Image (spheres, grey):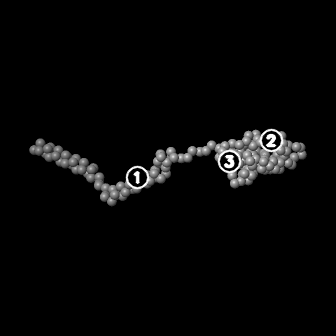
Amino acid sequence: MAAKEKQAALEEADAKAGEAEGEASAPRRKLPLKLIIIAAGALALLAGGGTAAYVFLGGSKEAKAVATPIKAPTFLDVPEVLVNLAGTERTQYLKVKIVLELPDPALTPQVQTAMPRVMDAFQTYLRELRPTDLDGSAGLYRLKEELTRRVNTAISPSRINAVLFKEIVVQ
């Protein structure tokens, strides 16, 4: 009988081990159908949004190839200007070499014909400057902006891009 009892005990132990394995796999549940549908919809929404962003925000290589080339500006030298500055006990002079930056080469003849008007605007403005008006980079920036405004007034309705300094000497 002892052999039968051993065999029964072994069979009982195997059955308990099988139940333990069955319990370990039991917590695994199937996902509800609603959750799967919601996840699939969210994934489709993200994919569609990404595709739309790519198309609308310039993902196409053809659109980039059609871009217009940037025109190089044209530069026009202005005759050198030498004026005495106002408001000083001793005479101080300002010598300026200026270049005008034109947006289009076709504008050159129009600016050259208006050059006497431009030079007059420069002379009258520069003669009223004091040496302290030219101090620092802020003073030169204000001078550049004022000269640009005066050139644009002289050649109106056309416009220049900027006044560029080649040389500025205060002595």
Image coordinates of residue 6 in percent, x first then y, are 15, 43
Mark closest to the chain's N terminus, 3 or 2: 2
Foreground: 130 or 68? 68
Name the residue rendered at 35%, 55% in the picture: 40
Foreground: 62 or 24? 62
What residue does disc 3 label? 107
Q: CA distance from mark 3 to mark 2?
A: 26 Å
Q: Is residue 37 visible?
A: yes
What label sits on residue 88 in the rendered view?
none
What label sits on residue 47 in the rendered view?
1
- Confirm or deny contact between disc 3 and disc 1 (CB under 8 A): no
Image coordinates of residue 147 in percent, x first then y, are 75, 49
Give the class, few, some or many, for how many residues have Cα within 10 Å of label 3's Cα (few <14, many ≥20): some
Mark 1 belongs to which amino acid? Ala
Q: Is residue 102 left or right of residue 87?
A: left
Mark 2 belongs to which amino acid? Lys
Name the residue rendered at 71%, 53% in the picture: 156
What residue does disc 2 label? 95
Mark nearest the camera among 3 and 1 is 3
Foreground: 27 or 80? 80
- Confirm or deny contact between disc 3 and disc 2 (CB under 8 A): no
Mark 3 belongs to which amino acid? Leu
Image coordinates of residue 36 in percent, x first then y, are 33, 56
Mark nearest the camera among 2 and 1 is 2
Name the residue rendered at 73%, 46% in the picture: 112
Q: Is residue 108 left or right of residue 40?
A: right
Residue 115 lies, with reference to residue 45, above or below; the image says above
